[in-house]
Image (tube, helix red, strand yellow):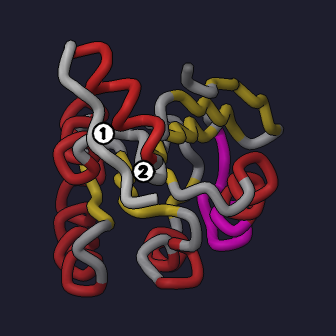
Amino acid sequence: MTHAFTYQAPYGVFHFSDGLLTVELAEDLIVDLPLMQRVAAQRMELLGQREVAELIVVPRAHLLLDRAALTWLAQSGALAGVHHRAVVVPAHLLVWRDRLYQMISRMRPNVRVFRNRRVAKGWLQERAGTFMPLPFQQQDLVDATADLGVPAPISAE
């Protein structure tokens, strides 16, 4: 069973499913550092310390996209609870996006900037393997092996 929800905030929509948190920012926003800090705080409030992959989508109709806000997303303080983050910026910012990508990829290999949402999501899936980094439990192995008709491993208890 997977936990999924959608939460509407004044500045965007948070959708969580199968270990992936997608944040679609609202149009006509100034995407600056205080906004991105609110997004991070909202994620922590909604998910606590659960570690997730995060996809942040900046709409084409934004008013201003502050470079400091996006570079902050690659800093360790902003990555609490996030194992990989992809940020999708509008294609019309292509040159600026490429410079930002080069700077961020030097800072953190687990944060990338994209112009295509599907490519960004594919990158997250490839890096995370799955969007559900769950702690391994012996019962999970017993259940999985029983489903496959394989005898359960003998525990060391």
- Label 1 sits on a secondary structure element that is loop
Question: Is residue 37 or residue 64 the one in the foreground?
Answer: 37
**Is mark 2 in CB contact (under 8 Å) with mark 1?**
no
Question: Is residue 3 or residue 115 the one in the foreground?
Answer: 3
Place of residue 6 in the rendered image (x, y in percent of width and height, measured from the top left): 69, 25
In the image, taking residue 6 as reference, residue 81 lies left or right, namely left
Snapshot quadrant of residue 132: top left
Residue that appears at 57% across and 72% down? 80
Report if residue 132 is visible in the image: yes
Residue that appears at 47% across and 30% down? 18
Question: Is residue 28 or residue 55 the one in the foreground?
Answer: 55
Residue that appears at 29% across and 86% down? 107
Task: Give the number of the disc on residue 60.
Answer: none
Instruction: Tell me if residue 125 comes above or below residue 51 in the rendering.
Output: above
Q: Residues within 10 Å of mark 1 (few under 14, many from 20)?
A: some
Q: Earlier in the sequence, mark 2 or mark 1?
A: 1
Give the residue pinned by disc 1.
Answer: 130
In the image, taking residue 63 as reference, residue 100 lies left or right, namely left
In the image, taking residue 67 as reference, residue 14 lies left or right, namely right
Q: Residues within 10 Å of mark 2 (few under 14, many from 20)?
A: few
In the image, taking residue 24 as reference, residue 152 lies left or right, namely left
Residue that appears at 30% across and 39% down? 130
- Label 2 sits on a secondary structure element that is loop
Q: CA distance from mark 2 to mark 1?
A: 14 Å
Snapshot quadrant of residue 12: top right
Q: Which residues are magenta?
A: 28-37
Type of the residue with mark 1: Thr
Give the residue pinned by disc 2.
Answer: 136
